Image: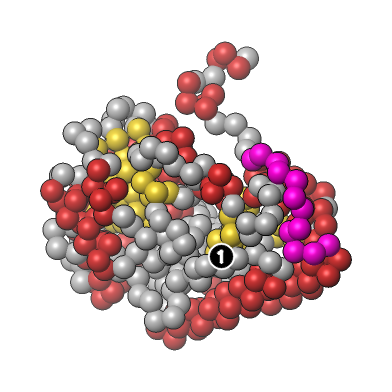
């Protein structure tokens, strides 16, 4: 039966991360791995969704009001002039918006530049389309963009660049100088950009998110993808969008209709309420997550993990395993699950060392990180802290000298 699978399908297989997820479930470990909140969504949004269901908005539906509101938001936040009738596609979450964007512009053999480490669905969508991912490593510990390395990655086959900022898994927010480098390179090489801006409202320490589309010459070559999921704690609603030049937005709509037809109708209606949120909501969200970030950063440092870079955005901490511990990231996570009852994500799942554009990449260093999510309730974070402190008092801080390969 496996011989009947497509060549692309054969490249996808269960990862060590999935196996660890099963282990975490069996051990009833506290979930600091997956990037979804375990606390309630805002009550007025839930009420709006319930009202929509009771009002029988339960069939295929396109809610144009979402596009109208998004056009006003990007004008206000980024100074972009967007036609809500032609330039916006509503999709089933950012994931589908991103995939549809890739399918709308990438032909087999086209190269797409991504920054490493990166979220795994980008690579998957590009591969399904027949594109060739080209990974450019960000430089730790602050995950800075090496402009020379980036510029060297362009070839005559380069079609697009993928930019995720604020960044998963590191929490980096690309600064204005880095964005200028990306913009200039894309204009010079006549390339498109697909951005993932789902964490745009979740930034810290006065760091501001800048959309690449706002830079000179970039709106006509940028596809913005985002969603309600992270900002409004509704990751299961699957309401996302792509904002792009009209011809590309039209292609994304056509692909969306042929794959899923319609985003969930009652949640589209509730999205209208979400998108009317006032500045106080976003500031409260930011402050709340900043406090959770600081709390978990302190706890992880207490147990011996190294935090060289405090996240500037998103709700993840990319912690480094200390040099004296010779366990790989996978085995450290397994140890935490079994002995502390807390689960994170091994960092190796975000690196693509075999496909990096530069030679001689340090593959070992890619097994030295663990991602932890702090988009959890105060009770969950407190319970995780207690478990981790008890673990460290009992076992010591990652003191095993056994070397295990990822």
Q: Residue 349 appears at what percent x and percent y?
A: 56, 45
Q: Residue at x 68, y 66 (%)?
A: 304
Q: Position of residue 84 (x, y in %)?
A: 25, 61
Between residue 338 and residue 252, name the one nearer to us: 338
What is the crowding at mark 1: few (fewer than 14 residues within 10 Å), some, or many (at least 20)?
A: many
Quadrant, the C terminus: top right
Element carrying mark 1: strand
State left or right for residue 94 relative to residue 182.
Answer: right
Which residue shows up at 31% across the image and 27% down it?
108
- 81 sits left or right of 351 in the view: left
Q: Which residues are magenta?
A: 395-406
Out of 283 and 403, give the one closest to the viewer.
403
User: Percent from the top left, x then y, of residue 25?
Assistant: 78, 51
Give whichever of 129, 91 is nearer the camera.
129
Q: Is residue 404 inside the magenta stretch? A: yes
Name the quadrant containing residue 392.
bottom right
Tally of numbered discs: 1
Above-or-below relation of 309 to 244:
below
The quarter of the rendered structure image containing the N terminus is: top right
Look at the image and tell me whether residue 261 can be seen.
no
Residue projecting furthest to the bottom = 280
406 or 43: nearer the eye?
Answer: 406
- Does any portion of residue 304 appear in the rendered image? yes
- Predominant SS along the magenta part: loop
Q: Is residue 360 magenta?
A: no
* Residue occupying the point 55% across, 64% down: 316
Taking the spot 20% from the left edge, 45% from the top edge, the residue there is 191
Residue at the disc numbered 1? 317
């Amino acid at each position: 039966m496996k011989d009947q699978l497509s060549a692309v399908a054969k490249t996808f297989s269960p990862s060590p991360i999935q196996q660890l997820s099963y282990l975490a479930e069996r051990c009833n470990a506290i979930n600091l791995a997956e990037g979804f909140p375990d606390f309630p969504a805002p009550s007025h949004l839930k009420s709006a969704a319930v009202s929509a269901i009771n009002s029988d908005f339960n069939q295929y539906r396109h809610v144009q009001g979402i596009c109208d509101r998004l056009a006003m938001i990007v004008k206000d936040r980024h100074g972009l002039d967007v036609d809500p009738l032609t330039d916006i596609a509503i999709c089933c979450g950012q994931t589908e918006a991103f995939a549809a964007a890739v399918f709308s512009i990438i032909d087999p053999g086209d190269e797409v530049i991504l920054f490493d480490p990166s979220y795994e669905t980008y690579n998957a969508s590009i591969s399904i389309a027949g594109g060739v991912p080209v990974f450019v490593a960000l430089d730790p510990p602050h995950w800075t963009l090496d402009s020379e390395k980036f510029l060297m990655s362009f070839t005559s086959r380069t079609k697009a660049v993928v930019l995720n900022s604020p960044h998963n898994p590191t929490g980096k927010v690309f600064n204005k100088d880095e964005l200028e480098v990306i913009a200039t390179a894309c204009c010079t090489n006549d390339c498109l950009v697909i951005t993932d801006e789902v964490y745009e409202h979740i930034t810290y320490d006065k760091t501001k998110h800048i959309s690449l589309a706002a830079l000179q010459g970039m709106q006509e070559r940028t596809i913005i993808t985002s969603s309600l999921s992270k900002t409004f704690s509704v990751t299961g609603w699957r309401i996302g969008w792509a904002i792009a030049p009209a011809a590309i937005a039209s292609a994304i709509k056509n692909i969306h209709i042929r794959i899923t037809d319609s985003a969930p109708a009652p949640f589209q209606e509730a999205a209208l309420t979400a998108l009317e949120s006032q500045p106080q909501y976003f500031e409260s969200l930011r402050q709340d997550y900043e406090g959770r970030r600081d709390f978990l950063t302190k706890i992880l440092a207490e147990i011996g993990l190294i935090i060289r870079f405090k996240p500037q955005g998103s709700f993840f901490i990319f912690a480094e395993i200390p040099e004296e511990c010779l366990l790989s990231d996978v085995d450290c996570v397994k140890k935490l699950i079994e002995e502390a009852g807390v689960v994170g994500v091994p960092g190796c799942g975000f690196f693509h060392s075999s496909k990096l554009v530069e030679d001689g990449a340090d593959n070992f260093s890619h097994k030295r990180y663990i991602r932890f999510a702090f988009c959890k309730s105060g009770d969950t974070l407190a319970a995780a802290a207690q478990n981790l402190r008890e673990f460290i008092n009992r076992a010591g801080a990652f003191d095993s000298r056994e070397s295990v390969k990822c």
